[in-house]
Image (cartoon, rainbow, N blue to C red):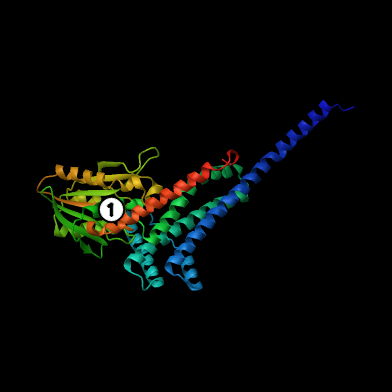
Amino acid sequence: MLTPDLISTILWFLFFIVFIIFGPKLLFIQTIVKLEEDVKKFEALATKNFNFVIKKISKRPTPELRRDVDSFLDFFAVEPVNLDPYGIVKKLDAIISMSEDKFNYFVKQIMPNASLTQRENIKNALLGAMSLRQLAKIVRHNFEIVKKYKMYQMALILQMQLPLVARIAKSYEAATLAFAEGKAIGDGIGPLVAAKMIKGKPVLLEKEEFVYYPTKMFGKNVIISKALGPGASTGKPHRFLEKIQKEFKIDRIITIDAGMRLEGEKQGTVVEGVGVALGGSGVERYEIEEFAVKNNIPLDAVIIKVSDEEALRPMIEPVFNAVPRAIESVERILRRTKRTENVLIIGVGNTCGVENSADKLQESIESIKREIKRMKEEEKQKKKKSDTLPESAV
């Protein structure tokens, strides 16, 4: 006769055997279901971004426009062969130039009556939407590989990485919205500092997409420059440098840019260094470094600390508040220079939403302050919502 203790023992052993046989499969199925939900969220975010850009291009988009933009978001550029590194920078520069020409041509075709600023903003918005779509495709690809080959270990790795990928996706989304609406982003702090220092009407170099302003500071000849705003552009700093050298003999270059902030570092910290503070593909930095070495020009740099996500999002308050400190750092460097030197100051970064001089900058500053206020309200609402949730839901 079976006693209750024996029955419970037998049931326990049966449960243990079933768990050993089917447990991993159940865990895998549970992980796959959760991953599929997350993948669909990424794809929905990419679709939402696409629809937003379409609405910014045209209030009444035609099916043809939607089809053309949808097709263009799959645009790609093949990087040059680097087996022999000699000449790789020139090749990369050529590929980048061809890509820019393709983007400019496409935007002009779909927005023939738009201003230069509007076209630059939409061009960068398309880049943001393209990056987000590519990210969603990569996540989908890895998910399908996991599902196809039933790789539980890879599923766990993908699941652990998704929170970081989600942060990047949110940054791309924020960047797309900011570019489309012409709002200043964290990466625009360099041009903002330069514009604040330009006290008169700057000279325009349209081909190089740059403006510059010769002035005197501390009795020294100073040329302050930035990419042409307020459209979303980084300009062509290395080509600008070649042209400006013909008019002024440059003795020192100071670059101002957003720099990488490590987790735990204070937002908007201003630091000084040497070298060229310039991100991107590396082509322009290489060209400026080559120019500086060839002409024996010292390179000073001032950076304002932002994280990768903060560089793409609308400018946050600590970064905006760093402008006076960045100007003080530039002035300290200028005081140390010789009186006979011609110093070139370059505000590096994307100048979306940033005007070209101090007298026209008020509208840009008001726009940044409004966006900061909006972000604060949004954060407050999120915190309030989180505080009202029951303990079981947290």
Residue closer to the observer: 358 or 90:
358
Graded by Cα atoms within 10 Å as few (under 14), some (14 to 19) or many (20 or more), the crowding at tag 1 reads many
Residue hosting label 1: 192
Inspect the image, locate mark 1, and give the three-letter code of the amino acid beneath it. Leu
Residue closer to the observer: 57 or 348:
57
Look at the numbered disc 1 and give the secondary structure of its residue: helix
* Residue at the spot 40% in from the left edge and 39% down from the top edge: 263
Disc count in the image?
1
Q: Can residue 78 be seen from the camera position used here?
A: no
Residue closer to the observer: 44 or 80:
44
Relative to residue 389, is residue 132 drawn left or right? Answer: left
| Coordinates of residue 98 in the picture (x, y in percent) | 35, 64
Relative to residue 277, is residue 376 drawn left or right? Answer: right
Relative to 7, is 167 above or below? below
* Residue at the spot 26% in from the left edge and 51% down from the top edge: 193
Q: Can residue 93 be seen from the camera position used here?
A: yes
| Coordinates of residue 35 in the picture (x, y in percent) | 59, 48
| Coordinates of residue 387 in the picture (x, y in percent) | 52, 41
Relative to residue 73, is residue 28 drawn left or right? Answer: right
Q: Quadrant of residue 261?
A: top left
* Residue at the spot 48% in from the left edge and 48% down from the top edge: 381
Q: Quadrant of the C terminus?
A: top right
| Coordinates of residue 194 in the picture (x, y in percent) | 24, 53
Relative to residue 136, is residue 295 drawn left or right? Answer: left
Q: Quadrant of the N terminus?
A: top right
